[in-house]
Image (tube, rainbow, N blue to C red):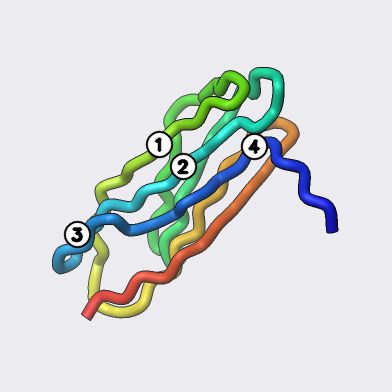
């Protein structure tokens, strides 16, 4: 397979977790040599919650944006977090698991 970098979602992580409160972080980067417009992102947490951008975003070539979401999990357990970034031409996704005890 050949992978061409374009609009990329990277580094989906949980840099802070205390009890049921977490900070979910992700990075979105434009690897193209032109602007990418109408970018939106969404986090889907265990099919319980969907959190996303309220407005479309524009990224210039080689620029990136950092997204941080403060989230309170509803209970203990293992949660699947799916992150997706898209525009009119590209889509990229990552997932992570977080366990709350």
Secondary element under disc 3, as helix, strand or loop, is strand
Measured Cα–Cα span from mark 3 to mark 4: 29 Å
Q: Decide: is 52 above or below 88.
A: below
Secondary element under disc 4, as helix, strand or loop, is strand
Q: Is residue 9 left or right of residue 92?
A: left
Answer whether labels 2 and 1 touch (C-beta < 8 Å).
yes
Secondary element under disc 1, as helix, strand or loop, is strand
Image spot of residue 3 (x, y percent): 77, 50
Identify the image quadrant of residue 20. Answer: bottom left
Looking at the image, is mark 1 or mark 3 earlier in the sequence?
Answer: 3
Q: Is residue 29 left or right of residue 75?
A: right
Quarter of the image for the N terminus: give it: bottom right
Looking at the image, is mark 3 or mark 2 earlier in the sequence?
Answer: 3
Quarter of the image for the C terminus: give it: bottom left
Answer whether labels 4 and 2 touch (C-beta < 8 Å).
no
Dot 2 corresponds to which residue?
27
Nearest-to-viewer mark from 1 and 3: 1
Name which residue lies at 55% across and 35% down. 29
Count of labels shown?
A: 4
Q: Is residue 23 left or right of residue 44?
A: left
Looking at the image, is mark 4 or mark 2 earlier in the sequence?
Answer: 4
Nearest-to-viewer mark from 3 and 4: 4
Dot 1 corresponds to which residue?
66
Measured Cα–Cα span from mark 4 to mark 2: 11 Å
Looking at the image, is mark 4 or mark 1 earlier in the sequence?
Answer: 4
Name which residue lies at 55% across and 45% down. 9
């Amino acid at each position: 397979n050949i992978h061409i970098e374009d609009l990329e979602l990277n580094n989906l992580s949980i840099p802070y977790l205390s009890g049921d409160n977490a900070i979910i972080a992700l990075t979105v980067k434009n690897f193209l040599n032109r602007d990418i417009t109408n970018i939106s992102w969404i986090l889907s947490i265990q099919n319980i919650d969907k959190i996303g951008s309220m407005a479309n975003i524009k990224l210039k070539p080689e620029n990136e944006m950092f997204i941080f979401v403060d989230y309170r999990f509803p209970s203990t357990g293992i949660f699947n977090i799916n992150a997706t970034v898209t525009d009119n031409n590209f889509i990229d996704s990552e997932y992570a698991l977080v366990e709350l005890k």
